[in-house]
Structures are given as structure tokens and as C-alpha cells.
Image: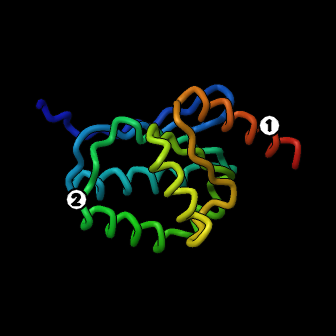
Amino acid sequence: MTKVPFDCQIETLQSGVVVVRVEGEATLEDVRGATATLLAEYRSWERPRTLVVDLSELEPVGAKIRQEFAAWRRRHRPVFKTSVYAGVFVVPTALLRGVLTAVSWVQPTNVTRTSYVATIEEAIQRAEAHERARESEL
């Protein structure tokens, strides 16, 4: 089986939704680089954004990487709370979506409006609805 190299791309759609696509097989250094880039992106926003994170092409990661990512999320919680209005995650496996949803009930994410969907199309549709709701709150 051919290994896909790690890649993390960030795109802002016309609607204002920010799409982060993560794919391939990540090393700890890859994750550290991607999280530094994401943090700089979040800090550059002039207003809270709705975020789509597409994990559908990311290879499973080991415990060390999961621990590192969890620690990064804890360290930067104040940035997420002020920068991210809503988060929609693309997770193609129904079982994993269910597990993530249950985990988010027990240990809430950094974002109050968090959901897990099967496809990028569904994620963008839901994210754009969040953006419209955010604008109506202003």
C-alpha cells in the first residue's frame, strides 16, 4: 500500500467559512507544524469564523500524536473561544462520528457549536448555515 504524505490546506470560502483539509500519514513534527499554522490563522481573523475540518483522508494517528493535539487544544482554548464560532468535522465513519459526539458531551470541545458529518458537502452546507446564524446575531 502506498503511503500518502501528510498535507494540511486552509481555504476561506466566499461565504466566510474556513475549510481545513488534513490528509495523509502524519508524524509528530507534521502535527506540530500544522497546529502552529492553524493557530496563526485563527489569530489573524478579525471576527469569529465557522470552521470545517475535513479529516476524511487523514490516516489514523498514534497515541503520542493524539496526546500532543489534545495538549495543544487545552493550551490554546482561549484563542478557539474567541476565534471559532462553530466547528463542523468531516468524519466518514458513522461509528467514529458517534464516538466523537459522545466524547464531546462528556468532554466538551473548545467550540460550543460542534458537529460531525459524513461528507465535505454536508459540512459546508451546515457551516454556511452557522455563518448565516452568526451574521443574524450581530
Say which residue label 2 marks: 28
The quarter holding residue 126 reads top right
Quadrant location of the N terminus?
top left
Q: Distance between the residues labelled 2 and 1?
A: 36 Å
Q: Which element is circle 2 on?
A: helix
* Drawn side of residue 108 relative to residue 65, left or right: right
**Residue 100 placed where, x, y %?**
51, 57
Q: Please tell me how crowded label 1 is: few (under 14), some (14-19), or many (20+) other residues with Cα within 10 Å.
A: few
Seen from the viewer's position, the closer of residues 66 and 93 is: 93
Q: Which element is circle 1 on?
A: helix
Q: Which amino acid does label 1 sit on?
A: Arg
Residue at the (82%, 42%) spot, across then down: 133
Seen from the viewer's position, the closer of residues 70 and 41 is: 70
Residue at the (87%, 49%) spot, across then down: 137
Say which residue label 1 marks: 132
Q: What residue type is labelled 2?
A: Leu
**Residue 134 placed where, x, y %?**
79, 46
Q: Please tell me how crowded label 2 is: few (under 14), some (14-19), or many (20+) other residues with Cα within 10 Å.
A: some
**Earlier residue among tags 2 and 1:** 2
Mark number for residue 69?
A: none
**Residue 71 placed where, x, y %?**
39, 72
Residue at the (62%, 66%) spot, across then down: 105
Seen from the viewer's position, the closer of residues 138 and 67 is: 67
* Drawn side of residue 47 relative to residue 55, left or right: right
**Residue 17 placed where, x, y %?**
63, 36
Residue at the (50%, 40%) spot, across then down: 90
Up-down relation of residue 27 to residue 125 (above or below) = below
Farthest-out residue, left: 1
